[in-house]
Image: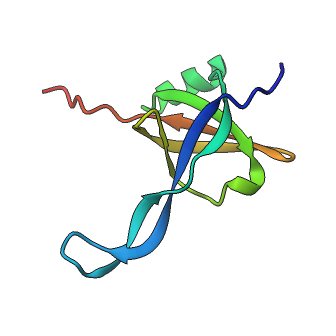
Amino acid sequence: MVATWDYEIQLIGLVDGVDDDGFPATVEKPKEPILANKLSIRSNEYWQSQQAGIELSLTFEIHAFEYNGEEKLLFKEQEYKIERTYEKGELIELICSRRSNDHGI
């Protein structure tokens, strides 16, 4: 499969800033956009995550040097949690889930 790097994502990192009350705090902030490949969730990984109560949504492949342990990312203005990573030499896969706002109410 040819890597086309067609998708733009923003990793969300922790930076020193101020909270809503104006006090110094460590806050989450989206980093500069980077290009990624969007991959399919592997079926066995999908079903295993379902058993653990996690619904995997997307997998992105980026250059490993661009990833610094971030736990979240933005894609198309939606926030995703990075559930797991998989290193592949100079590349790394970010396996992500998206939390729904629907809490069964």
- Quarter of the picture containing the N terminus is top right
Coloration of the structure image:
rainbow
Residue 75 in the image: state x and y as whole percent.
49, 36
Judge left or right: residue 34 versus residue 74.
right
Q: Residue furthest right?
A: 89
Residue ID at (64%, 21%)? 40
Q: Viewer-proximal residue, 88 or 27?
A: 27
Res. 66 image quadrant: bottom right
Judge left or right: residue 17 versus residue 31.
left
Vertically, is 70 above or below 104?
below
Res. 92 image quadrant: top right
Residue ID at (38%, 67%)? 27
Residue 9 in the image: state x and y as whole percent.
56, 41
Vertically, is 1 above or below 70?
above
- Quarter of the picture containing the C terminus is top left
Q: Viewer-proximal residue, 75 or 86?
A: 75
Vertically, is 44 above or below 36?
above
Residue ID at (34%, 77%)? 25
Q: How many marks?
A: 0
Q: Residue furthest left?
A: 105
Residue 97 in the image: state x and y as whole percent.
48, 34
Res. 84 image quadrant: top right
Q: Viewer-proximal residue, 101 or 78?
A: 78
Residue 11 in the image: state x and y as whole percent.
55, 50
Residue ID at (57%, 26%)? 48
Q: Residue furthest bottom?
A: 24
